[in-house]
Image (cartoon, helix red, strand yellow):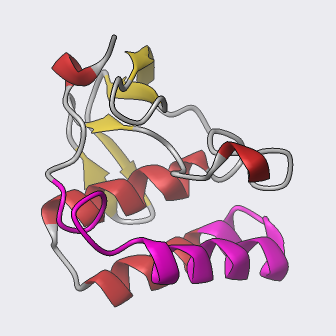
Amino acid sequence: MIIPIEYIGVQESSGRGLWVFTEDWTFDGYTIPKGFVTDGGSIPKLFWSFLNPTGAGMSAYCVHDWLYTTHQVSRLEADTILKELLMKRNLGVFHSNCAFYAVRLFGGGKNSWDAPGPKVEDAV
């Protein structure tokens, strides 16, 4: 699966990579519009060898970021959708559950659920 995104740099405030959608993209019934910016999986570097923030789960992470930015569903629903999409990408029960519980524990607050999401101009 090719995701129509382009790397645009690093977010200064978090040090995470940023990608912008170069065209509208639909995955599993969720459509992300051209111009939306994502940081992939918001996974601490310590865990990247185990949970790659831009690997096989990237499509699920993009949808999750879209849902967190738009609030089309509740936070619990967005986190559950992440888990289900990771399972559909064949990342396994353990990986999917780790991602789910991580976002349940750390996905609230001003830096994630309550944040507006990164913008193109945030890239350096």
Where in the figure is residue 61, as x and y percent of width and height?
50, 55
* Near-viewer residue (11 or 99): 11
Where in the figure is residue 46, as x and y percent of width and height?
76, 48
Residue at image coords 69%, 43%: 45
| Chain part drawn in magenta | 86-115
> With 58 as the anchor, is 98 left or right in this view?
right
Q: Is residue 122 above or below residue 59?
A: above
Instruction: Identify the image quadrant of the N terminus.
Output: top right
Residue at image coords 63%, 45%: 53
Where in the figure is residue 48, as x and y percent of width and height?
76, 45
Q: Is residue 25 above or below residue 43?
A: above
Residue at image coords 22%, 47%: 117
> With 103 as the anchor, is 115 left or right in this view?
left
Q: Quadrant of residue 90?
A: bottom right
Q: Quadrant of residue 119?
A: top left
* Near-viewer residue (16 or 27): 16
Q: Quadrant of residue 123?
A: top left
Where in the figure is residue 74, as x and y percent of width and height?
23, 85
> With 78 as the anchor, is 110 left or right in this view?
left
Instruction: Identify the image quadrant of the C terminus.
Output: top left
Majority secondary structure of the magenta segment? helix
> With 1 as the anchor, is 119 left or right in this view?
left
Q: Is residue 106 above or below residue 26?
A: below
